[in-house]
Amino acid sequence: MSDSEEHHFESKADAGASKTYPQQAGTVRKNGYIVIKGRPCKVVEVSTSKTGKHGHAKCHFVGIDIFTGKKFDDIVPSSHNCDIPHVNRTDYQLIDISEDGFVSLLTENGNTKDDLRLPTDDSLLTQIKDGFGEGKDLVVTVMSAMGEEQICSLKDIGPK
C-alpha cells in the first residue's frame, strides 16, 4: 500500500460496540440493569444465597423487561459474569404523529427520526395524543437497549 492512498472512515459512536458488557453477578444491584433470557431488564429484586456444598454463592435476580414490562428471573453464581445491557436515554422533540401509529421526532442535529412507534402504555399514549392534539410542544424520552427503542416518558415544554 502506498503512502498516497488516504482512508476516510465515518465514525459512529456505536460502531462495533457490543450491545452488552460483562459484570460480576455479585456486584449487580437493585434498580440496575441485567440481561435475563436475552431481554434487557431492570432489576427489581436481588437475593444472594450462601455458599453451599458445591461451593458457589448464588444470586437470584428478578427483573422487569424495560420494553414489554414482563417479569423474568434468573439464578447465577455470584462469582460468574452476567450480561449488562447498554441502556441509553435520548430526548427528542415530537413533530408529528402519523395515522399508522408512528411518530416523527426532531433530533438534536435537526434531522427527523421516523422509525418509532407510539408507546403501548395506555396512559403515556393518551398523554402524548392529547398534548399533541392541544398543540403543546412535547419532548419525548426514548430508551434504547440491545437494538430496541421505545418512548418511555414525556415532558411538556409549553405551548408552541
Image (tube, rainbow, N blue to C red):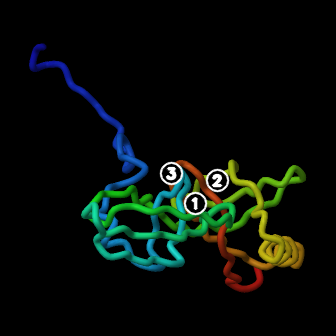
Disc 2 secondary structure class: strand
Q: Position of residue 92 (x, y in %)?
A: 61, 66
Depth check: give the residue in front, 19 or 89. Answer: 19
Disc assigned to residue 107: 1
Residue denoted by label 3: 146
Q: Position of residue 55 (x, y in %)?
A: 25, 64
The mark closer to the camera, 3 or 2, is: 3
- Circle 3: is it few (<14), some (14-19), or many (20+) Cα within 10 Å? some
Disc assigned to residue 112: 2
Between the residue at mark 3 and the residue at mark 1, the CA separation in whole angstroms equals 20 Å
Disc 1 secondary structure class: loop
- Circle 1: is it few (<14), some (14-19), or many (20+) Cα within 10 Å? some
Q: Residue furthest top?
A: 1
Note whether 146 is above or below 28 in the view shown. above
Q: Position of residue 160 (x, y in %)?
A: 76, 78
Name the residue type under label 2: Thr
